[in-house]
Structure formats: structure tokens, C-alpha cells
Amino acid sequence: MKKIIALLAVFMMFTACDSDDDTNEGDDPILGTWFVAEMENSLSDDELSECNLNSNITFYADNTADSEYYEEVENECVSDEESSTWEKNSNGQYTFDLPIFGRQTGDVEFSGNNRFKFSIPSVPGVSLTFEK
């Protein structure tokens, strides 16, 4: 009888965890893998290369993120990977790590479910657009 009660308790614990996970999944539109699509930069004439367009960030529900940054080095497309954290701030802004710019807090403007623009107030004139 004690084994049955123990098994029931374990089952209930896993069931409770699963239902908690389901309610959090998909709550934030930033969750998922996003590829850099465009860069606006009034500070320089730099443009994204075909290689740069492979760069992406994956945002997870546990507030962690994995990113891959691609750049052209000696006519070869090379990548660098990084794991970090992200957060949605109370004022609707997000904070996460960007290659070159480091950890930034910025305004996120979603266009449907598959596109968002990240504007960086600390670097006026610079924004990145991401697509799923």
C-alpha cells in the first residue's frame, strides 16, 4: 500500500509540473528561433552580408537564450556561439545579449508572429529586425 501511495504522489508531482509548463509555454511572443533579417544603422554605412543573415537567437521559456553569430573572415563564413539569459522588463522592453553590442535593453516591436524590430535606445539610430 505504501508503494502505491508513493507512486501516486510521484505521478501527481509530474502531472503538476507538466500542467505548469503548458501554461507558460507560448506566453511570450519572443520565444523561438529568430534570424537577423535587417539592420538599420545611421552611425555607419555597414550592411549585413549574406553570411550575417545566418545569425540567430533562440529564446527559451526559462529565460535562457542561445545565439549564433556569423561573420565573413578572409572570404569564409565563420560562426561563434553563445549562451546567455534574457528578460522582459515591466515597461515592455526586453534585455538580451547581442553580438558586437553586448547586453542591451531595447524596445521590441512585433509585426505579427514572425517578425520583430529591436531598437536600442542607448545606441540611437541602430535597430535590428529579426524573423522566424
Image (cartoon, rainbow, N blue to C red):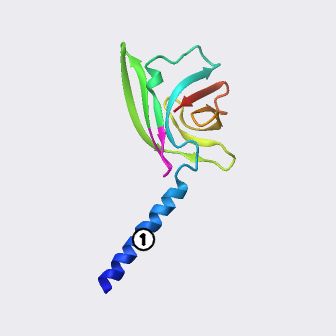
Q: Quick check: is 65 in the magenta stretch?
A: yes
Image quarter in which the N terminus is found? bottom left
In the image, 45 versus 37, the foreground residue is 37
Magenta-colored span: 58-66
Q: Quick check: is 36 in the magenta stretch?
A: no
Q: With 93 as the anchor, is 131 left or right in this view?
A: left
In the image, 117 versus 4, the foreground residue is 4
Residue at the disc numbered 1: 13
Q: With 97 as the anchor, is 41 left or right in this view?
A: right
Q: Quadrant of residue 123?
A: top right
For the residue marked with disc 1, what is the amino acid? Met
Image point (54%, 49%), residue name: 26
Position of residue 119 measured from the top left corner of the image (x, y, whole percent)? 64, 31
Image point (34%, 79%), residue name: 6
Position of residue 44 measured from the top left corner of the image (x, y, whole percent)? 60, 16
Vertical order, 100 against 77 (above or below): below
Q: Quadrant of residue 105?
A: top right
Position of residue 12 measured from the top left corner of the image (x, y, whole percent)? 42, 72
In the image, 110 versus 112, the foreground residue is 112
Vertical order, 85 against 132 (above or below): below
Vertical order, 23 against 125 (above or below): below
Image point (46%, 22%), residue name: 52
Image point (49%, 58%), residue name: 21
